[in-house]
């Protein structure tokens, strides 16, 4: 086991769980993406724009992303925009595009383009409804530049995965005309008690992502000051946004509302969990649980669940093996989960019915969709496992990769526990932010009927 300096929480137990490994995992090839940085202003002009352009060019060079910069709105033609995987609106202000240029950008987004807005991008094009939907929320006001605490809500997205739970930094903190939370995926929000002048009633998103009419859209409210673009943490935040927006990295950017934590990164939140079988999980100072030793199962004992959406983030170091178990009865014997529940596998190198996204031993994931959605070793992934009646569906980084219906009475999914696997001493898999939303269920509902889930 590698030495990581983690705080260790020992959870003991005894027995082997299913799972196997084969050859080494392969990372995706390096992206060869192209990005257009647009910084035209028709209102207030930020003196940090040249620093932002320089930072984005430097970050692009390190990530294999070619970055072009312009303030010429004539670049917004259908033919020219097709050259780019994403367009960055860097502290643009006011009405910067005419009607023809707006229509070209709309077509670009609807055909799968990417948008990244930085800071005053929210102070742009107030009369263009499509742009308002892309950026997510419009600027309203701001207090003086000052330090504040940014609460990181998503620890898997590449723009925020490197950040601590509480990120302290100085910037000009925007208030917005509306709260975008219902229709975007919030990555980070401001703690309004940590600074003066915030006016969004305690729920203050400051960075978010979403898909909009076929395209990807990412926005961060940071970046007013020149110093921001020399700050390694903020630069990594921008690079992660760029990588997701261009499609070089994957993340679940669907709106996420109504979930409650089962494990929130603290030792206190492990009180409802029990270890079955040998081995254990190490609780890291960064709020992660990492498998170590043994072959067992850490399961949530405080409550069983019927209809629900379970979300969690996971990361492998290399060719590692683990899984998420659902629908099993309470037991300190991990074979009970194997024989009476289902495992959603984590191991991208095994045979189809035993690979990442499969219902282990029963049904392969859609491998083309799985491969499109999967981030390589060393990067975080997000599972959503949704159980309704006997139907079990799996989303990987927001992409549905499996849809399975149970027909075995011994494995009924209508009531059961959830857990995560520690597979073996040579496997190192990390988990974080395990959360759940219980769903309504009509017991007479046909198994193949899709239930709408608000906020997903």
Image (tube, rainbow, N blue to C red):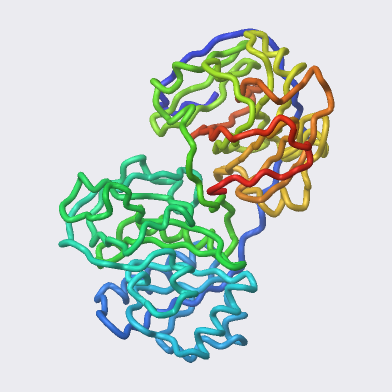
Q: Is residue 95 left or right of residue 298?
A: left
Q: Residue at x 20, y 44 (%)?
A: 193
Please determine whether, in this image, residue 46 is positioned above or below residue 311.
below
Q: Nearer the viewer, residue 368 or 105?
A: 105
Q: Is residue 296 left or right of residue 134?
A: right
Q: Residue at x 71, y 25 (%)?
A: 413
Q: Taking the image as drawn, is residue 53 in sight?
A: yes
Q: Quadrant of residue 222?
A: bottom left
Q: Quadrant of residue 244?
A: bottom right
Quadrant including the N terminus: top right
Percent position of residue 111, x then y: 64, 73
Percent position of residue 423, x then y: 66, 22
Q: How many marks?
A: 0
Percent position of residue 98, x then y: 45, 90
Q: Is residue 167 left or right of residue 453?
A: left
Q: Residue at x 31, y 42 (%)?
A: 166
Percent position of residue 77, x then y: 56, 88
Q: Is residue 47 left or right of residue 248?
A: left
Please determine whether, in this image, residue 100 is positioned above or below residue 392.
below
Q: Nearer the viewer, residue 425 or 242?
A: 242
Q: Residue at x 36, y 69 (%)?
A: 122
Q: Nearer the viewer, residue 317 or 179?
A: 179
Q: Taking the image as drawn, is residue 229 in sight?
A: no
Q: Nearer the viewer, residue 89 or 341?
A: 341
Please determine whether, in this image, residue 442 is positioned above or below residue 331.
below
């Amino acid at each position: 086991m590698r030495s990581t300096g983690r705080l260790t929480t020992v959870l003991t137990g005894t027995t082997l769980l299913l799972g196997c490994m084969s050859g080494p995992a392969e990372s995706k090839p390096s992206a060869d993406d192209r990005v257009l940085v647009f910084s035209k202003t028709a209102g207030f002009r930020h003196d940090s724009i040249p620093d932002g352009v320089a930072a984005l060019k430097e970050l692009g060079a390190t990530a294999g992303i070619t970055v072009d910069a312009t303030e010429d709105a004539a670049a917004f033609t259908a033919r020219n925009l097709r050259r780019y995987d994403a367009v960055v609106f860097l502290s643009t202000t006011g009405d910067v595009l005419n009607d023809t240029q707006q229509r070209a950008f709309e077509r670009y987004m609807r055909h799968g383009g990417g948008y990244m807005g930085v800071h005053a991008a929210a102070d742009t094009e107030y009369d263009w409804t499509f742009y308002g939907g892309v950026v997510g929320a419009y600027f309203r006001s701001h207090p003086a530049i000052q330090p504040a605490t940014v609460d990181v809500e998503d620890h898997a997205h590449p723009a925020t995965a490197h950040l601590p739970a509480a990120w302290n930094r100085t910037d000009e903190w925007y208030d917005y005309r509306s709260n975008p939370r219902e229709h975007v995926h919030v990555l980070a929000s401001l703690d309004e008690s940590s600074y003066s002048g915030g006016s969004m009633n305690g729920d203050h998103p400051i960075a978010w992502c979403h898909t909009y009419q076929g395209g990807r859209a990412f926005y961060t409210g940071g970046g007013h000051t020149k110093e921001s673009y020399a700050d390694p943490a903020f630069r990594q935040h921008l690079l992660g946004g760029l990588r997701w927006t261009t499609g070089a990295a994957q993340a679940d950017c669907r709106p996420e509302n109504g979930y409650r934590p089962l494990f929130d990164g603290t030792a206190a939140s492990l009180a409802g969990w029990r270890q079955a079988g040998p081995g254990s999980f190490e609780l890291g100072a960064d709020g992660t649980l990492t498998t170590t030793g043994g072959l067992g199962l850490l399961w949530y004992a405080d409550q069983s669940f019927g209809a629900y959406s379970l979300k969690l983030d996971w990361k492998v170091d290399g060719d590692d093996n683990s899984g998420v178990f659902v629908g099993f009865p309470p037991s300190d014997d991990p074979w009970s989960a194997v024989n009476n529940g289902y495992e959603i596998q984590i191991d991208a190198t095994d045979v189809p019915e035993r690979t990442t996204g499969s219902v282990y031993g029963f049904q392969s994931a859609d491998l083309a969709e799985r491969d499109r959605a999967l981030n390589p070793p060393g990067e975080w992934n997000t599972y959503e496992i949704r159980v309704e009646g006997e139907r079990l569906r799996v989303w990987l980084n927001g992409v549905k990769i499996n849809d399975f219906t149970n027909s075995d009475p011994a494995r009924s999914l209508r009531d059961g526990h959830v857990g995560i696997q520690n597979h073996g001493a040579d496997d190192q898999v990390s988990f974080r932010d395990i959360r759940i939303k219980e769903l309504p269920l009509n017991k007479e509902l046909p198994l193949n009927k899709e239930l709408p889930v608000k906020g997903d």
